[in-house]
Image (cartoon, helix red, strand yellow):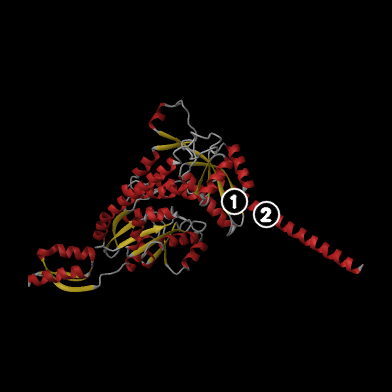
Amino acid sequence: MEEASHRLDDELDAVTADDLDRDRGRAGNETDGRAADAILARVLSRAGTAVSEGGTLDTDYDGDQYDREERAALRRVAGLSTELEDVTEVEYRQLRLERVVLVGQWSRGTVADAEVGLRELAALAETAGSEVLDGVLQRRPHPDPATYIGAGKAEEVRDLVKAWGADTVIVNDDLAPSQRRALEDVVKVKVIDRTALILDIFAQHAKSREGKAQVELAQLEYLLPRLRGWGESMSRQAGGRVAGGEGIGSRGPGETKIELDRRRIRTRMAQLRRQIKAMEPARAVRRERRLELPNVAIVGYTNAGKSSLLNRVTGAGVLVENALFATLDPTVRRSQTPDGRAFTVSDTVGFVRDLPHQLVAAFASTLEEAAHADLILHVVDAAHPDPEGQIRAVHEVLSDVPGAMAVPELLVLNKCDLADHATVLQLRSRRERTVEVSALTGEGIDGLMDVVGEMLPRPGVRVDLVVPYTRGDLVSEAHTHGEVLAESHEADGTHLVALVDQALAARLKASAADAS
């Protein structure tokens, strides 16, 4: 009897423990669900997305911004009608906004990390020209191998698509081709992943010949393993009674169309690689010409304010827009330090978390600008909820560019007028040297230029000689490319004391020797 009583007590304890575990799991799931719902509510309210936060603000340094007017000529509207209510509508090319539903997965990190990731996806979708209607955020340890989110969640997304009348589902991750097909079979609308979304934005914003070729190459590399077969326009190869009972006469040429598509894509990719390679000599010549001056490369996360900073420092007047990947084509402009030394400033393509590897490979020639620079200005949006994550994302991309991580780096904490003081203090504690600026108001720009002048390499050869008046070009070059310490005018020529590079020093000494 005592043994039976002990067994009964043990079983009751086990049942109670199981009930407690189930209750804890149920409570945890409810907590995760409430957190996911709260994140979605904040994201869908559009608060803080890149395309809704106060619009685009211009300064006197941004120029006329004709590029933005040209981009706005393709006006997107919420709906299209076959009848024009106003005759002026004929002046605009109208493109209907895609109605999208977001799908995110929260497998690691904090609630704040999940919100930042979904908010960035919403900003990317709106930048691509879509209207975000609703979303689903799922907490699970790892993606479902079949549909990424599981059968139950996929049916929930299908119900949302039907309720809102959406035509696209955007997933905040890279999908395998099988996952994409399986999810489309359930939701019954087009499904795209994060990589396809970023590639679409790049295709919209690329303007130069090289930039368009790079984007097309990246798109084809992404498309090649995702071609679909067994469509109505293809024929299967079968014999006997296998082909649906048709038997003799049912044999076809095989799945020829998809093979032809693959061959055409590979041929086009080879052509694009040759075109990009043929553009490299011209880029190398331009780079060699610029190497006469010290070079500063501006890098940073997308929408961190790189173009605004370039306009503020050099007056370049490049496009400034409160959107992700607003500018893709590199821009090089000239500026000078407070002590009069000239240098060039190169603006590069913006980075993003989990930047598609196809883009990193295609834009290798553009990203090499950072490796050939004398100083990297790493622009950080100090007002962003996760600036440390943005810094890590930029460093991950730079680590794939040979030689870029060896270049001295200066962290430029932009938007300091909007940033939280505690966040700025945390960023100051990093090992990289930091400078706080506001490209919009101009705050801290003078201090930035002082630090740039201090960190740029100085010419290493000191000359003290008299340059004949007939070689005023050498004196001018010493002022432009070197550092003039003293200058006086004598009877035989210009007495010059300066720090210059070896090539200019040799020419100065030769001219002084010829005059004597």
**Dividing the image into 4 quarters, which one contains the N terminus?**
bottom right
Which of the numbered marks, if any, corresponds to residue 227? none
- Residue 420 x, y percent position in the rendering: 51, 59
Quickly name the residue at label 1. Answer: 39
Outermost residue on the right side: it is: 1
Is residue 440 shown to the viewer in this render? no
Which of these two is toward me, 308 or 364? Answer: 364
- How would you rate the neighbour count of disc 2 (Cα within 10 Å): few for under 14, some for 14-19, many for 20 or more? some
For marks 1 and 2, give the CA distance.
15 Å
- Residue 255 x, y percent position in the rendering: 45, 41
- How would you rate the neighbour count of disc 1 (Cα within 10 Å): few for under 14, some for 14-19, many for 20 or more? many
**Dividing the image into 4 quarters, which one contains the C terminus?**
bottom left
| Residue at 49%, 45% in the rendered image | 125
- Residue 150 x, y percent position in the rendering: 61, 49
| Residue at 40%, 56% in the rendered image | 360
Which amino acid type is shown beneath numbered disc 2?
Asn
Secondary element at image label 2: helix
Q: Is residue 225 left or right of residue 342?
A: right
| Residue at 41%, 62% in the rendered image | 400
Query: Which numbered disc flags the more N-terminal residue, 1 or 2?
Result: 2
Assess whether mark 2 and mark 1 are in contact (beta carbons under 8 angstroms). no
338 up-or-down from 201: above or below: below
Secondary element at image label 1: helix
Which amino acid type is shown beneath numbered disc 1?
Ile
Quickly name the residue at label 2. Answer: 29
Tally of numbered tags: 2
- Residue 447 x, y percent position in the rendering: 37, 63
